[in-house]
Image: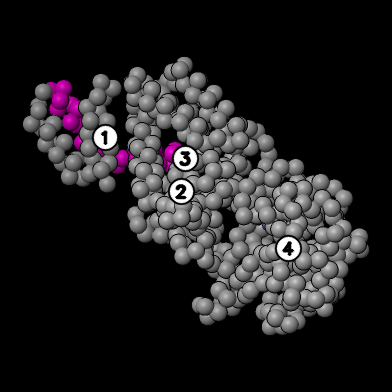
Amino acid sequence: MYSCGLTVYNYAHIGNLRTYIFSDILRRTLEYEGYDVIHVMNVTDVGHLTSDADEGEDKLEKGAREVGKSVWEIARFYEEAFWKDLDLLNIEKPKIICRATEHIPDMIALIQRLIDRGHAYETDQAVYFDISTFPKYTEFTRQPLEQKVVGAREEVQEDPGKKYPADFALWFKAVGRFKNHIMRWDSPWGVGFPGWHIECSAMAMKYLGETLDIHTGGEDHIWVHHPNEIAQSEAATGKQFVRFWMHGSFLIVGDRNASGEEKRMGKSEGNFIRLQTLIDKGYDPLAYRYACLMAHYRQKLRFTWESMDAAAAGYASLKEFAARAKQIGGEEPPWVDEYRRRFRAAIEDDLNMPQAMAAVSEMIREAETRKEYGVLDALYDFDRVLGLRLRESAEAATEIDPGIQALIEEREQARKAKDWARADQIRNQLAEQGIILEDTPSGTLWRRTR
Ligand SMILES: [Zn+2]
Ligand SMILES: [Zn+2]
C-alpha cells in the first residue's frame, strides 16, 4: 500500500491530516482483517512548483526564503513536524518512508526507460512524457484531454519545444526560469531536478513492485497526479500499476459562502488550521481523529468549532465510559456478539466508520441500560481500528496512588460501621484532591475531575 505523502514546505493543515487518518484507518482495517500490510509513504522534499500546471514558484524555495533557512533545513524541519502530528493523531508510521531527494537515481532510471520505449522526449528546457503514446491516459478520470489543456497553457508558451500542451514534465533542466533552482542533480539531460509525479512512480515500484495493491491520496490527486503516475508507470512496464485507488475527501471549513460555494482548507485559502492550533485551543488531538471518524472518507467533512466541540465531548464521554467499565469489570455478556458483528460489517463496507461508531455508541448505551459493563475487551478490540488510545486512557484514569486507595477502603469500612461522619470527612478530603466518589450496587467507583 502506497500513500502519497506530504510536500514538506510548510506545516500540514488538518485537512491534509484527515487524508492520513483515512489511510491509517484503511491500514488498521486491513491488519484487523489479518492482512500483512507493507505501507510505504513518500516525503516530497524536492521543491516542486506551486501549481500542477508546472508554472509559478518553487514551494520549497519560497518557504525557505520566507523564514531565512536553506531548502534542506526547511524540508527536514517540516518533515519532523509532520511525523509529530501523525504521532499525536495515533497514526501508525508507515513501514517504509522514502524521501524523494534520496531516490533521484531511481527516477532518472525510470525516465530513461520511458525515453527508450518512446514515451518521453527531451527539449531545451525539460524531458516530457508524451501523452499521445499512451491512449489510456483519459481512462482514469474520463475527462477529455482538451479540458486538461486549459490548465497547461502557460507552460506551452514557456516551452515551444513541447509537442502537446497536456504533456507533463518528468525532468526540469536548470535553465531559464529554473536557472537558480537550489536543489539540483546531474542527469543524462543535464543538471536539473525531477518533476513531482515521477517520484511516486519510481518509489512505489521500487518498494512494492511494478503492480501494487493499493494507492491512496487526497481527492485532489484524481485529476492530475494520479493519471500521470499511471501513465508513467504503465508506459514503462506494460503492466497494471495499481489494483485499487482510494482517495480521501476534503475537509470543508466553516459554512458555505453567499454564493453557496464550499471552501476547502488550503495553504492558499487563508483558512489554515494546524493540529497545533487545536491543541492551543485546549483540544485533545485525538478529538480531531474522533471527528474524522464521524464522516465517511469519501464524503466532505465540514469543520466548524461547534463540530469540534461536539467531537471533543463525544470523545470525552467515550473515555469516561471506558474508565467506568474498567473499574466495574465483569464477564462479557452474550449480547456483545451482535455489536462485534456490526462493527466488523461496517468497517468491511468500504470503511464505513460512521456506522462502526454507531455500533460502538449503541453498545455503550446497552451496557449502561443493562448495567452490564463487561464490554471492555470488545471496545479495546474495536480500538485497534479506531486508534483512539482507549486502553491507555482507561488505564491512566483508573491508576490511583496507594494513599488514595487506602482512604477509599477506610471509607468503605466507616460506612459498614455506620460511621457517617468519618465517611463524609473522607469523601470531602478526596473531593479536594479531585477524586469524586460514586456509591453503586457494584461498590464505590471513583473518577477524577482534573
Ligand atoms: Zn504522489
Ligand atoms: Zn500517488
Q: Main secondary structure of the magenta part?
A: helix
User: From where the camera sits, is residue 364 visible?
Assistant: yes
Q: Which mark is residue 446?
A: 1
* Residue type highlighted by circle 2: Arg
Q: Where does residue 330 sit, x and y in percent of width and height? A: 39, 22
- Callout in the foreground (4, 2): 4
Q: Secondary structure at mark 3?
A: loop
- Callout in the foreground (4, 1): 4
> In the rendered structure, which disc, 4 or 2, sits on the residue that comes first in sequence?
4
Task: Please give the name of the residue rendered at 34% of the width and 54% of the height, measured from the top-left corner.
Answer: 282
> In the rendered structure, which disc, 4 or 1, sits on the residue that comes first in sequence?
4
- For marks 1 and 2, give the CA distance: 37 Å
Q: Which residue is mark 3?
A: 294
- Callout in the foreground (1, 2): 2
- For marks 4 and 1, give the CA distance: 66 Å
- Mark 1 packing: few (<14 Cα in 10 Å), some, or many (20+)? many
> In the rendered structure, which disc, 4 or 3, sits on the residue that comes first in sequence?
4
Q: Residue furthest left?
A: 421
Q: 109 or 98, which is in the foreground?
A: 109
User: From where the camera sits, is residue 41 visible?
Assistant: no
Q: Which residue is mark 2?
A: 302
Q: Which residue is mark 4?
A: 149
> In the rendered structure, which disc, 2 or 3, sits on the residue that comes first in sequence?
3
- For marks 4 and 3, give the CA distance: 38 Å
Task: Please give the name of the residue rendered at 25% of the width and 28% of the height, measured from the top-left corner.
Answer: 444
Q: Secondary structure at mark 4?
A: helix
